């Protein structure tokens, strides 16, 4: 995927896509808001005409001109006020509704990205961080665009009035071109600098959160690093702000010069009308009024264009990029996920390096995981165990080689459908602070509120004791920061996470990536022995039409992994041994050595 800022989708098509998104969400409010913005522009734009009629009608005692002027001026003020009030109220409702739609859209997009590669690339993280900041104000893009159209309408009416005096006065708009250029150019320059400064700003925010929130609070106080965090946060902020401030000073100078050019043109137009054309007082007054308003209209127009370019257009470009990025993840997913595994899963010379690095975490891995088997993956820290699991879950794609599911490349299987047939629990689980029933139930969304299914999953995970200690059982709110919420220990959270992983009854692949690290070895062994026996029961029926489930177990405890049908030993990113426990012990290789070291520690 392209990574430079210049490779974001083009601005105007991106904004058009965002507008379509708003129209799909609230078509009626969008149309009415746009119409009111245009109507509100007309009374103000015609103000110079009413002044001309008044200035021409009074000396000539022309009652018709005076009356027309009086009516125009009389209607202008209340009409402007009424249209603006109505426009503001309608737009406020539109913005509230479209904001929810946009936020939901961005959240849905980020949650549906097939891989988590975008969380590993700094340039993507910067882009997503800015989009998260901008999505809350992206609704302003619609208002800014409507307002821009209103200012352009005012500008067009004003230029038409000037040309009615003399066509040459249209040249006043030419003197405004430098202001338009600098206003359109300035935000883009500043935004580019801000994006380059995003890493420093992210660091400043991270340090601020570290210094001021509860989770790191104990260690911040015990280590006494509070002052250091504050100092580093200040330094990071200044490192990010300094280039932005310098860019703003430079662009401000150019913008001031552009407005000086327009000022010269405005004075020249007044002199031309009064001295060269020797026009009527009304015409001179119209040029004065329309010319002065022209500068205000140009300023407002280029200001809105600047906002559109600097924030709203950039926000819509990042939104369009995220939409394209999500779509590209399943671009070649044209195969169907099998209902049951017949051939199993094969790794064919799979290598992998994390995004932004060249070091291979997995190197030339070839494996065959048979249907209905329990497979243990062992190795020292950093050997690539969790990475192999992430590849199986399609959180990443192999750098080279391929993973086949019943002979079909895993990248050809739609990620969402494939994951709907996975289940699992991980060491770095997330603490869903919901009611306990939902904390477990989210492991199988269609059965989120199915209490019997949740009870079964809790029993599978051996978490009955956790639920029994909760005041309201499965209806207990977890998390002490919520009303009536309770705190539970890390080990209890881990058991609930394991229960969540056991919610799906018939997964094709069950992944248990050290999900019981907080439990004692005896409890872990008993739990997995029971589950491995159940998995093997499934495998015996695989030939009769059951799912042929493969269970992947990652653990540092060899007393647990010895029960597996197949043990895969990783060392230095490579597979060095494969076999059952007895076979590997008989070989006296790396597995036997690690097993002996751990057994000696227990003795």
Image: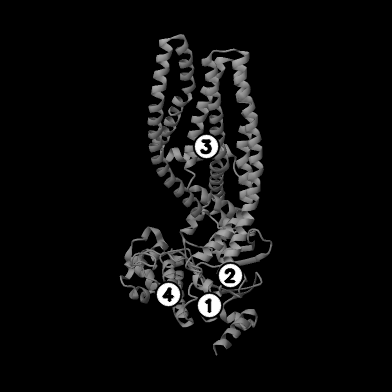
**Cα distance between the residues tagged 3 and 4:** 50 Å
For disc 3, the marked residue is 16
Q: Is residue 13 left or right of residue 497?
A: right
Q: Is residue 162 above or below residue 528?
A: above
**Cα distance between the residues tagged 1 and 3:** 56 Å
Q: Is residue 543 left or right of residue 298?
A: left
Name the outermost residue toward the bottom: 603
Mark 2 or 1: in front is 2
Mark 2 or 4: in front is 4
On residue 385, the disc is 2
Mark 1 or 4: in front is 4
Is there a contact, CB below 8 Å, between mark 1 and mark 3? no
Mark 2 or 3: in front is 3
Please tell me whether mark 2 sits on a helix, a strand or a loop: helix
For disc 1, the marked residue is 561
**Dot 2 or dot 4, earlier in sequence:** 2
Please tell me which residue lies in front, 89 or 519. 89
For disc 4, the marked residue is 489
- Visible in this render: residue 537? no
Please tell me which residue lies in front, 175 or 184. 175
Please tell me whether mark 3 sits on a helix, a strand or a loop: helix
**Cα distance between the residues tagged 1 and 4:** 26 Å
Q: Is residue 449 above or below residue 153?
A: below
**Cα distance between the residues tagged 2 and 3:** 45 Å
Q: Residues within 10 Å of mark 2 (few under 14, many from 20)?
A: many
Please tell me which residue lies in front, 276 or 11. 276
**Dot 2 or dot 1, earlier in sequence:** 2
Is there a contact, CB below 8 Å, between mark 1 and mark 4? no
**Cα distance between the residues tagged 2 and 1:** 13 Å
């Amino acid at each position: 995927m392209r990574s430079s800022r210049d490779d974001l989708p083009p601005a105007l098509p991106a904004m058009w896509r965002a507008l379509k998104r708003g129209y799909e969400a609230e078509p009626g409010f969008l149309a009415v808001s746009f119409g009111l913005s245009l109507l509100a522009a007309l009374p103000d734009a015609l103000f110079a005409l009413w002044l001309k009629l008044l200035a021409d009608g009074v000396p000539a005692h022309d009652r018709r001109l005076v009356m027309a002027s009086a009516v125009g001026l009389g209607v202008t003020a209340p009409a402007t006020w009424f249209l603006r009030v109505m426009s503001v109220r309608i737009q406020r409702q539109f913005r509230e509704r479209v904001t929810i739609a946009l936020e939901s859209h961005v959240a849905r997009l980020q949650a549906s990205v097939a891989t988590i590669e975008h969380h590993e690339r700094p340039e993507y993280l910067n882009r997503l961080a800015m989009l998260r900041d901008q999505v809350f104000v992206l609704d302003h893009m619609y208002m800014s665009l409507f307002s821009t159209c209103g200012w352009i309408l005012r500008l067009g009416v004003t230029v038409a009035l000037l040309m009615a005096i003399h066509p040459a006065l249209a040249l006043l708009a030419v003197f405004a071109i430098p202001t338009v250029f600098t206003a359109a150019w300035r935000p883009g320059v500043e935004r580019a600098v801000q994006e380059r400064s995003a890493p420093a700003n992210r660091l400043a925010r991270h340090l601020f959160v570290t210094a001021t929130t509860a989770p790191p609070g104990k260690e911040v106080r015990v280590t006494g690093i509070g002052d250091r965090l504050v100092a580093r946060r200040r330094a990071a902020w200044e490192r990010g702000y300094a280039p932005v401030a310098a860019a703003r000073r430079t662009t401000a100078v150019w913008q001031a010069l552009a407005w000086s050019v327009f000022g010269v043109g405005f004075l020249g137009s007044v002199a031309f009308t009064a001295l060269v054309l020797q026009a009527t007082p009304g015409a001179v007054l119209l040029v004065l009024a329309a010319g002065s308003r022209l500068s205000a209209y140009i300023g407002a127009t280029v200001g809105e264009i600047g906002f559109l370019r600097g924030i709203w257009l950039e926000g819509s470009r990042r939104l369009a990029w995220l939409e394209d990025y999500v779509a590209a993840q399943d671009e070649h997913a044209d195969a169907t996920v099998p209902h049951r595994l017949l051939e199993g899963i094969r790794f064919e010379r799979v290598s992998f390096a994390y995004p932004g690095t060249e070091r291979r975490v997995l190197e030339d891995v070839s494996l065959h995981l048979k249907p209905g088997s329990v497979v243990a993956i062992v190795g020292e820290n950093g050997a690539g165990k969790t990475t192999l699991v992430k590849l199986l879950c399609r959180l990443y794609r192999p750098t080279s080689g391929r993973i086949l599911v019943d002979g079909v490349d895993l990248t050809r299987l739609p990620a969402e459908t494939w994951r709907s047939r996975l289940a699992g629990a991980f060491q770095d689980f997330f603490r869903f602070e919901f009611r306990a029933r939902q904390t477990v139930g989210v492991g199988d969304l269609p059965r989120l509120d199915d209490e019997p299914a949740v009870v079964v999953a809790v029993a599978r995970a051996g978490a009955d004791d956790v639920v029994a200690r909760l005041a309201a059982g499965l209806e207990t709110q977890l998390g002490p920061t919520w009303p009536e919420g309770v705190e539970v220990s890390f080990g209890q959270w881990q058991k609930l996470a394991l229960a969540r992983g056991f919610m799906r009854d018939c997964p094709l692949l069950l992944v248990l990536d050290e999900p019981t690290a907080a439990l004692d070895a005896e409890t872990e062994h008993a739990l997995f022995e029971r589950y491995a026996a159940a998995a093997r029961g499934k495998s015996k029926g695989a030939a009769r039409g059951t799912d042929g489930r493969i269970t992947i177990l990652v653990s540092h405890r060899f007393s647990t992994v010895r029960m597996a049908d197949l043990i895969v030993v990783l060392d230095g990113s490579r597979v060095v041994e494969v076999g059952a426990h007895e076979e590997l012990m008989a070989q006296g290789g790396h597995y036997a050595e690690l097993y002996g070291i751990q057994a000696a520690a227990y003795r």
